Image (spheres, coloured by chain):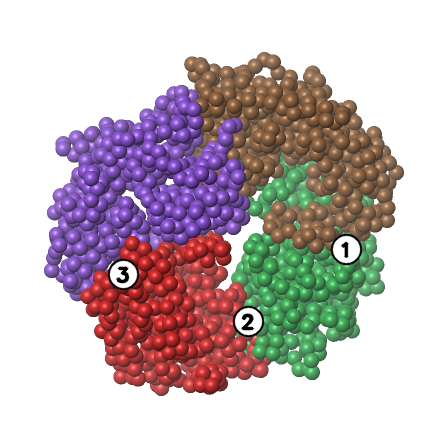
Chain colours: A red, B purple, C green, D brown
Amino acid sequence: MLNEIRSLNEECGVFGVWGHPDANQLAYFGLHSLQHRGQEGAGIVTNDNGQLLGYRDRGLLADVFRNPENLAQLTGEAAIGHVRYATAGSHGLENIQPFLFDFADGQFALAHNGNLTNAVTLRRQLEDEGAILKSSSDSEILMHLIRRAAGPDLHTKVKTALNQIHGGFAYVLLTQDSLIAMLDPNGFRPLSIGQMANGAYVVASETCALNAVEAIFIRDVQPGEVVTIDRDGLHSDFFTTETTHSICSMEYIYFARPDSDICGINVHAARKRMGKRLAAETGVDADMVIGVPNSSLSAASGYAEASGLPYEMGLVKNQYVGRTFIQPTQALREQGVNRKLAVVKSVVAGKRIVLVDDSIVRGTTSKHIVKRLKEAGALEVHLRVASPPLKYPCFYGIDIQTREELIASQQSVAQMCETIGADSLAFLSQEGLIDAIGLHQDAPYSGLCMAYFNGDYPTPLYDYEADYQASLKQDKE
Amino acid sequence: MLNEIRSLNEECGVFGVWGHPDANQLAYFGLHSLQHRGQEGAGIVTNDNGQLLGYRDRGLLADVFRNPENLAQLTGEAAIGHVRYATAGSHGLENIQPFLFDFADGQFALAHNGNLTNAVTLRRQLEDEGAILKSSSDSEILMHLIRRAAGPDLHTKVKTALNQIHGGFAYVLLTQDSLIAMLDPNGFRPLSIGQMANGAYVVASETCALNAVEAIFIRDVQPGEVVTIDRDGLHSDFFTTETTHSICSMEYIYFARPDSDICGINVHAARKRMGKRLAAETGVDADMVIGVPNSSLSAASGYAEASGLPYEMGLVKNQYVGRTFIQPTQALREQGVNRKLAVVKSVVAGKRIVLVDDSIVRGTTSKHIVKRLKEAGALEVHLRVASPPLKYPCFYGIDIQTREELIASQQSVAQMCETIGADSLAFLSQEGLIDAIGLHQDAPYSGLCMAYFNGDYPTPLYDYEADYQASLKQDKE
Amino acid sequence: MLNEIRSLNEECGVFGVWGHPDANQLAYFGLHSLQHRGQEGAGIVTNDNGQLLGYRDRGLLADVFRNPENLAQLTGEAAIGHVRYATAGSHGLENIQPFLFDFADGQFALAHNGNLTNAVTLRRQLEDEGAILKSSSDSEILMHLIRRAAGPDLHTKVKTALNQIHGGFAYVLLTQDSLIAMLDPNGFRPLSIGQMANGAYVVASETCALNAVEAIFIRDVQPGEVVTIDRDGLHSDFFTTETTHSICSMEYIYFARPDSDICGINVHAARKRMGKRLAAETGVDADMVIGVPNSSLSAASGYAEASGLPYEMGLVKNQYVGRTFIQPTQALREQGVNRKLAVVKSVVAGKRIVLVDDSIVRGTTSKHIVKRLKEAGALEVHLRVASPPLKYPCFYGIDIQTREELIASQQSVAQMCETIGADSLAFLSQEGLIDAIGLHQDAPYSGLCMAYFNGDYPTPLYDYEADYQASLKQDKE
Amino acid sequence: MLNEIRSLNEECGVFGVWGHPDANQLAYFGLHSLQHRGQEGAGIVTNDNGQLLGYRDRGLLADVFRNPENLAQLTGEAAIGHVRYATAGSHGLENIQPFLFDFADGQFALAHNGNLTNAVTLRRQLEDEGAILKSSSDSEILMHLIRRAAGPDLHTKVKTALNQIHGGFAYVLLTQDSLIAMLDPNGFRPLSIGQMANGAYVVASETCALNAVEAIFIRDVQPGEVVTIDRDGLHSDFFTTETTHSICSMEYIYFARPDSDICGINVHAARKRMGKRLAAETGVDADMVIGVPNSSLSAASGYAEASGLPYEMGLVKNQYVGRTFIQPTQALREQGVNRKLAVVKSVVAGKRIVLVDDSIVRGTTSKHIVKRLKEAGALEVHLRVASPPLKYPCFYGIDIQTREELIASQQSVAQMCETIGADSLAFLSQEGLIDAIGLHQDAPYSGLCMAYFNGDYPTPLYDYEADYQASLKQDKE
């Protein structure tokens, strides 16, 4: 139950632009570069001289706007957009963002990336007060809080509402006369600001979206900050001073696009350093390095470079997989018919392989790959993971499973190695990860959230606390 | 005109299976792994106890078979399939293969990869004799020739017909009681045979399709060979003894999937060796190596390994590009809004870059990438091409432009360097290419067709001869 | 503004079933027979042992459930469904019903046909109290009121909430253990109850939906009634005793399907009687009677029968119109290219025609048809309308335009005749309409709402009162 | 086998226009009005200054051209188009017309309505001479014959070819400089010529398509005529003088649109006269007349008028049926859930009904309707059929089943009545049909083909003769 609610707003992408006549198209191209953050649904709301216009639907951005008229009708010089991640139980139409609210006294559109840790409590409180929440989304909760907040103006109400919510959140809010970007006090989720040649401002979950619309990166939104963009330019304010930077380390490890910079650190470069450090920490005698495509390729090339081993393409991913509607029958699957990942037999046969993966969640994929490499003739497969063991769930917006599902929370490294069938298994150390990312902020773990590895959550867990403690206790028993 | 006809059957993929109850599904998964060879149309014909059943349509394989019923209805234990490459002027429904012919005396299905050099002449002869060709495809020509051939049985007729056609061709023919695979006397196009655990035979344009259905590679179809598979097993015959191996070098350079083996040589490994040799031949002082995704990544990693320079991800390709229906407006395109390829500014800024590409055709893409790298702050961009300059068109099945469109046939390397805007430009030598591929056959150029680089066509050009000579003459003037 | 809000819930169709293992399919077939009541969107919510499951989307029912999986996943033995009418400005995804509400203490699904006259006031009150309404729908308002109502149980709360809303409404509410049908105190909208062979109860906007699922008609839901169906059977209660029957006369005139019975009166038969009475009241010397397809055919055949004139097919409607995406260019339209309605020249040429239409709203369609009949050679066109002149808007759920748009509120019959270009024009009298329908209830106008014709609204107009009075005043000036 | 080949080109619609800048759109709207003649596939070929451009695909016209670009690309001032009827075994892409032929010496596009009686023989002859026919269509046969014909020019070749084919055919042929319309020597199929305001000529299977594009009817194409339209205007020639008019009576009875005129006779009016004559011939004491929608409504209204009985709407057809993808489960079907045709219980209960149908093929639909009327309470159901008993198959282009499937060829009227469950059954006489249509031509049966009723085929049956004789013999045994 908790799990179901928790996962609803995870791993999405948000985008906003203010001050460009092609706002709808810019939102489209910005979101297109953020498509890896969510493939279940997408939407755009524009502001045409104070009137908000929206369109959203299930599917990839390109499907939602397959009919060009759907995009063309979204006129105006400002826009926000959202791509939504698929999670079980939240496939309803009503959860696709941005939400567009029509009040008697004005219109608002809101989009969200992250996860609130006190959403259940807030939802219950709101319902007890007679509120009706039509979606399972944390966006709707924030809008309720803003509407119920006391205060002379919207800005005050927004700040009041932001102080009532906890967890990881990056919101973009489009009103009839402004675009507002907000980040949680820990800055768990990335959110960057850029500017286009004509002066238009852009905000986006990742800098790859700034690049996609040829905007120049200005700066990241800061933890606890409320950035308001309107006809007078960009204004900064903070809804709280109690901030500590805890940017999500998983964004660096596998989630963000390699061409994005998070807090000034390029993701590909960070991954490559993780691979190098991994080589240094866990070196093994082998013939070649192979990465699991696509997200592990940076780390694998780093490993290869540091180890002096050749980096080879022993696994190839079919780039057309996303479009396939026909699945192999069970019979064919058992015969090994696999349409996603191909093992290059002539590369791996008779070779001792270092297989670099970015992370291990359940271990099933790793087990499958190791098995197929061996079937293809690999002599040895040494699995090297460019992150520490994932032992604890994320409550701030990454869809990491419950503890029960995380193999590293249930088994020792030796056990995992046996389960997976590798000849050896080793992980990057926590220090290695922190050093490789190289954030160097004056905050715990240099400014990273490392809770998935060590359980050291930067904030109280609120609604999740009881379940989490129970799961820890269960492990001990 | 010639050009239009010439390009019709180029760069396709064929697949066949005989002797498996899931023939339709195997064809689907085999073709899926060959999707890179053609995205315009696809089709499958099966043989259900002597009755041929087919379905084909425009679009990607997954679109053609989006309705699972379209595939499920193709019952039977044998199948052939085809994926079709998009070329201007040949978008008609009638060109999508396999072709299914219903004669009063039997049914045939035929699919083709390659290009005939005497198609225009044959077409004219056939039409003069009253024939009507409904498609622009070389497959239909072969079927006409088979039907008109004298001989006691199909096998004889097929051999007679094959001796009438010239050029590059790999055909699969499904009859009511056999599956026949045929290769031109030079073996320009790849065609391999595999076998599944249950004994079923598989033929495919690339070995990646054998792997996709978990078939074991047996051997390649030989130049001039006719392989017949029927209930009695596999039979080999040759329609000619005048054969010389001239496998297309462009298959190794950019066209085939890296996990395929062509004539026993793994494509990725060959590309990596090209990159290494390129580094040895054209080394330059720089900070990093960047490959143009995706086809140049193997060569780039080879270059990096050989040069000792780090291999970095300075360019990222959006994996969702294929599905986008909305193009940037001209205004946005001029502002640099680009949805396909992203430059990673933080990686390239302030750096001297070796940019490795697999080949240069018109030079426009290279020019665009160099420009964007420089805008992103690259200090120097040294373009290194992992193949010799492309100066001559292909008439055997690769869609290489006419000489006028090949920049290397019009400009010197120095001129090209200036046109492209690179700080230096160098190509792999012809010897380097031959050595890197490492085919070592007892044939000219070790068994490779090198005509694109040196104009040394292994066969007469027939219908293309006059135009080709005119283009050479024009160049001299 | 008022107009925009007013039109949102008009002319929809609702369906509910309780107690059948194929509830999802029954809802599908029931809604399919109600498709004429709304084509913009559709949805179904089922109750599977207390868990509500829903699916809804834009488009016709067949489009929404084109993928059979969308319907198959809606398991359970009870269901409600909705088809939605297209009105300007309400195309948002969020307005497609049934709405599915997930509260911490339970789930509810609600669907609505009708229009509330105090929706603006209620919406404002709710927003003032902090409520957020995500749709423009009256359904959401009722749910807010139910949640905020005091009372020991749901039934009490529902009755309290129903007493707060005014206007025309037919709601079906699906809870975790019951199906509830509710009708406004005037019974403006039709709502009938049937029973299937297995005992399952069905409620639907029209009896044609009962027939579609082979349910036997039991009775109509009564004005002010709350019918609750649960595992113990059907229970009746009334939320008010101040009821007067005022069933919408427009349902009989053009909106309902001819095979439906409303309050025991068959719609086709009523229309035929209207035509007969029209002939008696407005007879004219002519050669034939032609009806405007499809809704006027019953009236036209009645006119023909009573007048003794032959009933001919002088106008033919293209049955494939709904599927056409390509519209004639303006140039072609001016040349008369018309893809919807065909005039049969050989039938009408040289003839004096009685053209029977069911009603006249703006008069533009009538003008167009008369013009085309004359172009086809009709000597005279006498327009006979099987309802009295439409002079006043509907506030109870029919999408009749504002007074300014109703030609009969702006022009005399003589003026209209000239505008339309007919040779004569006559309408059915109010008495004629009442007699022809033959409801004979002990209520004003025999139980019909005749306000569209005489402005005698059966209830206060609440939010619409001021605008309405202003429009009357404007007319006088 | 014969049957399979025979049915391939039946019941299609053709359209052609010459001399209008919007030829593509006119073809679209013309075909749209002919959609009732074929729903399986559609296509259009235009002539843009001598270059032919085509697009065709499976599905309704609106589906084929759902993407407006598909139509917009078909530029030029002339066009032909085709809508294709669905028959078992001919669903292949290759059968969708118009066919576009690209020869070295020119382009041709051809579309066909009808059926050749010597197609099998011609096909075998052509194949024996080495021809390859890629479709099962009679259009391809004609093109082969034209190509093989001797003669100084196309016109001569066309005439030669037309003399080789037998059966019913209406062809439109688009060449690079002309539009040619051709009709078989019996004029089995309708084909009319019209002219637009700008002088453009239009040919179409039915006059409703002339009306749809606002063309004035000029005249019908005559049996044995070849009409050539080019820049010099319209030219008439005949390929044979041995002609006898035998227009298909089934076009009048049920196939054509009621607003079309065939040979100067309006279809609706003819049907109404059939109904009147039917009443005169087969009168019965009853309370009302009901027609089977939609094609029997004209006849039913005629019956009602002549009999003095009221014409009532006791059956209603759901206008949205075509779009439904979900079928009732067998269980629901047995419970009577029917989404196509609704019985209006309140109309029919307790009544003695005359049920008018246009024709009876297998009798299964009649049986079903009678059963449902009785279940709804009808006291008596007297089935009256507005055509004589269908006893013999059609070989000229109407998809009438083999003799075994025609109930009237297997049972007496009394037996049929019992099978169907009606209280009485009567058919229109052959003389009644001929009189009612009123063609009055100087030819057998006034110019009608009556073979379906009396086996008097106006031509030899060629390839069908043997099977036909065998079926007659079988009946006798």
Residue depicted at x 53% and y 22%: D122
Which residue in the protein does label 1 denote?
A: C261
Indicate left or right for C346 with D5 as reference. Answer: right
Determine which of the numbered discs, if any, sits on residue A134 in the image: 2
Of the 4 image quadrants, the one containing the C terminus of chain D is top right
Residue depicted at x 31% and y 66%: A381
Residue D155 at x, y percent in the picture: 47, 18
| Disc on the earlier residue, 2 or 3 | 2
Q: Chain of mark 2?
A: A
Are the numbered discs 3 and 1 placed on the same chain, yes or no? Answer: no
How far is mark 2 from mark 3, CA to CA? 56 Å
**Quick one: SS at disc 3?**
loop
Residue B397 makes an appearance in the image? no
Q: Chain of mark 3?
A: A
Residue depicted at x 36% and y 64%: A370
Are the numbered discs 2 and 1 placed on the same chain, yes or no? Answer: no
Determine which of the numbered discs, if any, sits on residue A351 in the image: 3
Of the 4 image quadrants, the one containing the N terminus of chain D is top right
**Quick one: SS at disc 1?**
strand
Disc number lying in front (2 or 3): 3
